[in-house]
Image (spheres, grey):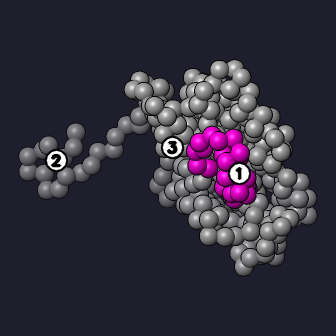
Amino acid sequence: MSTAAIPGAPLPVRTPGSRARGRHRRPERPEIRTGSPALVLAVPASAGPESRSVVEELLSIVRSEHTGVQAAVGYLPTAGTEASEERTVAELLATAAEAGLPTPVVVPLVPGPHDFLTGLHALAAEYGATVTDALGPHPLLAEAVHVRLSEAGLARADRARLFAIATAADGVVLTTVGGEDAAAAAGITGVLLAARLAVPVVAAALDVPGSVAAAVNHLKETGSERPALAPLVIGPEADSELLATAAEETGCPSAAPLGAYPTVGQLIASTYLAALPTPTAEELAEAEAEAAATGGAGEGSRRAHAAAEGPVEG
């Protein structure tokens, strides 16, 4: 009972509430341990106004999700892009090595296979850095694509709302970059998207000539009258002209790229957390001892074991 309900109590004292229970409770966020390696978000492009705004917003989401994470953007210019004054992945890894810091965890900012990953792995190997998998396929990416389609008036916001949208697509081409391998991987996210939209979804590669047009024709041949394009593209990894050309050549409306949609930031954070080294028994014991010395043994133990268990899937 709170003292606010006791007559004559001088000041109300907030009573801690019990932790929410049940399958719909919000998972606890694991604490980033002191001394953990930094997160380097590897961007397959040179810095520019558009790419910079997207990646900085994504890092803002990551930091809000997990306080204490040390994160930075590292660019990895691809062929045909110009150099910039922004830090590259190589510079960030070299700086950490020179300072004697733990080798950063490198998270590539791509939803699937991409040409720049080969060079990124070779670069990381020089410093012994860990490169995580790409961000997809993943249900959160399907959610982000769904939202972008609804924002463009090409899909209902959710299936629970049964009102009709005259411009809603009755077939979707999920467009990505990275060649046929990327299109094959995008097909998995496409299955998840089709389940959300209840319309057929096929994947195609923007950087493979004729791939998008063939996918659109396939949808039309199988009964779709209003196919639309849905980019499975975050932004910096794809030439914006590819998106515009695909829409123009096929005559299909297109949703916007995923950009800094919140679930993309959440995926970056969870991917980084999954790559962190598991605390040893000695480190857990030290955390408990330190917490006990400061009067928070129970809380310190809980946080230490939460860090050991890693991220909880929502």
Q: Residues within 10 Å of mark 1 (few under 14, many from 20)?
A: few
Q: Earlier in the sequence, mark 2 or mark 1?
A: 2
Mark drawn on residue 51: none
Which residue in the structure is indicated by mark 1?
Answer: 245
Where residue 52 appears, as percent x and y from the top left, is 63, 67
* Left or right of 152 on screen, residue 177: right
**Does residue 131 show up?**
yes
Element at badge 1?
helix
Which residue in the structure is indicated by mark 3?
Answer: 152
* Left or right of 10 on screen, residue 22: right
Q: Residues within 10 Å of mark 3 (few under 14, many from 20)?
A: some
Where residue 307 appears, as percent x and y from the top left, is 63, 47
| The magenta stretch spans residue 80 | no
CA–CA distance in space, label 2 to label 1: 65 Å
**Does residue 31 show up?**
no
Name the residue type under label 2.
Ala
Determine whether 83 is above or below 67 in the image.
below
* Left or right of 280 on screen, residue 68: left
Residue 200 image-quadrant placement: top right
Looking at the rendered image, the disc whose residue lies closer to the viewer, 2 or 3, is 3
Q: Earlier in the sequence, mark 3 or mark 1?
A: 3
Mark drawn on residue 4: 2
Determine whether 1 is above or below 280 in the image.
above
Q: Residue at x 78, y 75 (%)?
A: 83
Looking at the rendered image, the disc whose residue lies closer to the viewer, 2 or 1, is 1
Residue numbers of the magenta segment: 235-257
